Amino acid sequence: MEKPFVFGVPADDVHFIGRETEIERLSANFRYGVNTVLMSPRRWGKTSLVNRVSGIFSKDSERIIVRMDIFACRSEYDFYNAFSSELLKQTASRIDEWKELAKGFIERLTPKISVNPDHTAEYSVSLGITPKTHTPKEILSLPQIIAERKKCDIVICIDEFQQIGEFPDSLSVQKRLRTVWQDQKNVSYCLYGSKMHMMMNLFQKKSYPFYRFGEILNLRPIPLGTWIPYIRSRFEAFGKSISDSLIEKICQSVEYQASYVQQLAYSILLMTDSEPTMESLKGGIEDLVSQNSGTFVEQTQSLTSYQLNFLRAVLDGVNQSFGESAIREQYNLGSPSNIARLKQALIDKELIEQTESGIIIGDPVLRFWLKRLL
């Protein structure tokens, strides 16, 4: 089934556009074993980029790309189980090869292997690793052992890596990972996640173990010149047309955030019989806000009055000097000592972002929704 636009899932095939510079750089890092940290706000296409570059190496006999998502991991050994299971599974195409690679590692375990009933090569592995069976160093050293056995290089791509920062005794966990990973000769890492402020803490604070672990690759918005032919072609594929000027307004409305551009374009496509107008754009934005309102309600339902007042100030254009008496009184922000707590709480909830120019609400659709609420 051909989809007009793609959002909420990684973009691929015709829906993956632009990123030529990033593809070239990330491909070089994969090829030469350079650790990479992908940085960008949510919905800018990090996972799509990693998937695209991984596909480039799909037939490369000299290296294996392993991809995993650790969002569900809540502790150090949750991570070790996910890490080792995905590593073993994705470096072996058959169960007998998996068993050969795992020699010396699973002798203390009784792994559960589930084979797809249709007899394809698909299988799942559950190892049940605990502190009694393996030390962290044994688990973290496994990629290098497999690389040496298979006489290849391995690139391990870990999505939602910020979860490491949420683990109990997180700094100790980070130190263990960094200590082992930095000395591996045939293994490199691509680390990325959806919570940018947590990723920045992990990789840009000098006191943290992963400081300068690898090259930080910052994603930028996909430019208008790339969006215009793509959106126009998608409308044409479904028997409709759209002007370049309206495509520009779509992109500007959601500040070029890739997933929102696709979702807004999709709403507008459904609302028009032939060629959309400015009224179609307004209707599309209304639909976009409505589609995302459930998420926003969940994010904001536990906010205090002070936190809501802080958001109101940001919506009105205040992005710094929150501690000034006039601003505190106008927006009822409480005492000067309360400001830092308000700011950090809202950053942690991903409702605001700290930028060089001050505090902003980085999600444009959230801004539309908050303006109606506040």
Image (cartoon, rainbow, N blue to C red):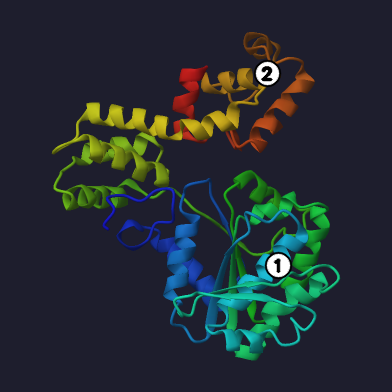
Residue 358, can we see it? no
Disc assigned to residue 204: none
- Mark 2, secondary structure of its residue: helix
Residue lying at the far right of the rendered structure: 132
Report x, y in % for residue 257: 42, 43
Taking 63 as reference, is 171 above or below it? above
* Residue placed under numbered mark 2 in the picture: 306
**Label 2 Cα neighbours within 10 Å, binned few <14 / some 14-19 / many ≥20:** some
Report x, y in % for residue 149: 65, 90
Report x, y in % for residue 370: 50, 23
Taking 112 as reference, is 47 above or below it? above
- Mark 1, secondary structure of its residue: helix
Question: Observer-nearest residue: 7 or 330?
Answer: 7
Number of the front mark, 1 or 2: 1
Question: Observer-nearest residue: 114 or 306?
Answer: 114
**Label 1 Cα neighbours within 10 Å, binned few <14 / some 14-19 / many ≥20:** some
Identified at 35% across, 31% down, the residue is 287
Residue 71 shown left or right of residue 61 in the figure: right
Identified at 66% across, 66% down, the residue is 82
Disc assigned to residue 81: 1
Does the residue at mark 1 contact the one at mark 2 (Cβ under 8 Å)?
no
Identified at 70% across, 26% down, the residue is 342
Q: Amino acid at mark 2?
A: Tyr
Question: Observer-nearest residue: 109 or 253?
Answer: 109
Q: Amino acid at mark 1?
A: Asn
Residue lying at the far front of the rendered structure: 117
Report x, y in % for residue 31: 52, 77
> Residues under labels 1 and 2: Cα distance?
42 Å
